[in-house]
Image (tube, helix red, strand yellow):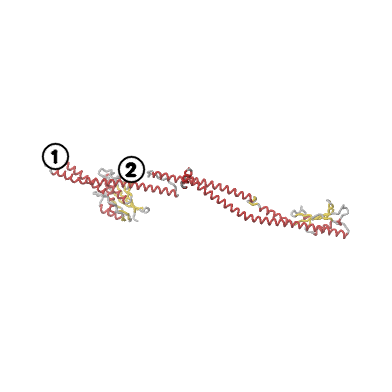
Amino acid sequence: MSAPTRRARAIRRVPWWGRLESRVITALVAVGILCVGASAYLVKLTIEYFDGLVGAAIERSDQAVDIAAAHYVDLVSARKEAYRARAAAIARELEVVALREGRAIEGADLEAILAREGDMVALSLLDGERALIEAERRALLPEASGAWIWVAADPIPVASAAAPEADREPELVALFALDPTIERRHQALGRLKRESEHVAVGPAVIVARGELERAAFQAIAAASALVLMVAFIAGFILARSTTRRVSELSRVMRAVAAGDLQARVRSLGQDELGLLGAAFNRMLDELAAAQRTVAYLERVGAWQEMARRIAHEIKNPLTPIQLAVQNLRDKDPGLSPEFSRLLATSVEIVEDEVGALRRMVGTFSQLAKVPEAQLEPVALGRILDEFGRAYGHLTERPSDVLEIAPAPEVEIVGDRQLLKQCLVNLVENAVLSGREAGPAPVRVRIRAAVDADAGAVELWVEDNGPGIALARRERVFEPYESSRAEGSGLGLAIVKKIILDHHGTIRVEESELGGAAFVIRLATAG
């Protein structure tokens, strides 16, 4: 077994896959999954790319912050060492003053040094926990200026500055104020380092970069699920709408295949399927019309064959019959008046019936000998003019009127002689119908109307007769279908046969004159 056959059998074993609706939904969902997957992959690549860029920048920033922080530590350490050195120098200075002047250190000495040192906040001589002498600059005290950083130098012994009441050599303690700009810069570095690990997502909302990435992927996952759900729902709706209309087309096709040419597709909208349904309906209309035409031509063909046989079988014996009865009448010896009257009456009846048979044979011959149409471009006005001149007055009664409206300047594709024959048959039929309506004058009108959009022209032959009932409008063209006792029912059949040979149509409408209107529709030349 070949691989395609195995695949086909495998597909047939899956019931739902055989339905167009299922395949459309599956295709749309697959396309949605591919689109969402591709979008997620692109988003991931984008995030990784920008993470690489931002991460590298953050890493360099962190390195710079770490270097600056190390410099800050070194700077503070250097400042502290400088403060200790200055405090030791001040202690030595106080010792020299005390030895040179032979006195104990006083508060004025500390005040003078404090006034000299601009960044010194306080200077004290301590005996353990007890302050012997203190000097301070209140403008730089912590409670007065919280923007300063306080650095205290290590206590330095001042041997020559011992006060008389001191138990041991006092120690000098100096308190310096570090420049707050340095501390603010250090705090700014700390903020930068913390902010490099977080992202601001609002005026007062800061989250870690890792949390933001997780939230982004969660949002992408939720959006993907939403897209897939929308794709499924849209696919389901679209598939149902599409397959329902395709099923309608399939239903009508099956009905037509079964022989029902009256089946039609319901309106399917204005899209491609709707246009396909409308085109299919037009095709069915044309097929039904063609079928009716073929069936009609077959019936007419059968009547033509029968007419040929009847004309052949009946025409030949008519003349001998008529001659025989005439001979009988001529050979009457006249011995019996009663017999002579009977013979004369019988001969008259036979001659009348022979005449009727001759007329019938003539009509059948006319149907059997309808010539083949020789189609060529011909001016419509020429046909109507020749018909008007040849037909003359409508009837022998002067009150009967034939109106021929001026023809438009248009050419049709047809046989001029056969079309004039059609007009003759239709006008004769109109005259007979008009006389059936009553003693009023017969009125027949011929007019033409051009349908430029369809490339066709319509010839109207109208009368003021009783009209034709709607139920009989199709049957009047059938051979031997006539409502008049003296009618053969073949005139309209001949007309329709000729019009069909011209690839035209003929129909019956109501006339503005009150009777029937026969409408011939023919294609224009070019």
User: Which residue is depicted at the point 52% across and 46% down?
Assistant: 232
Task: Looking at the picture, tell me which residue is in the foreground, 404 or 459.
Answer: 459
Give the image location of residue 439, x and y in percent: 26, 45
Per the rendering, the mark at residue 247 is: none
Q: Residue furthest bottom?
A: 100
Give the image location of residue 421, x and y in percent: 27, 51
Q: Gap between marks 1 and 2, in whole Å? A: 52 Å
Task: Looking at the picture, tell me which residue is in the foreground, 516 or 126.
Answer: 126
Q: Quadrant of the C terminus?
A: bottom left
Q: Amino acid at mark 1?
A: Phe
Label located before the other in sequence (1 or 2): 1
Q: Amino acid at mark 2?
A: Ala
Per the rendering, the mark at residue 471 is: 2
Q: Which residue is mark 1?
A: 339
Task: Looking at the picture, tell me which residue is in the foreground, 48 or 478.
Answer: 48
Q: Is residue 284 above or below residue 179?
A: above
* Classed neighbour count for the residue bearing mark 2: other residues with Cα under 10 Å, few (<14), some (14–19), many (≥20): few
In this rendering, would 453 be left or right of 128? left
Q: Nearer the viewer, mark 1 or mark 2?
A: 1
Residue 158 sits in quarter: bottom right
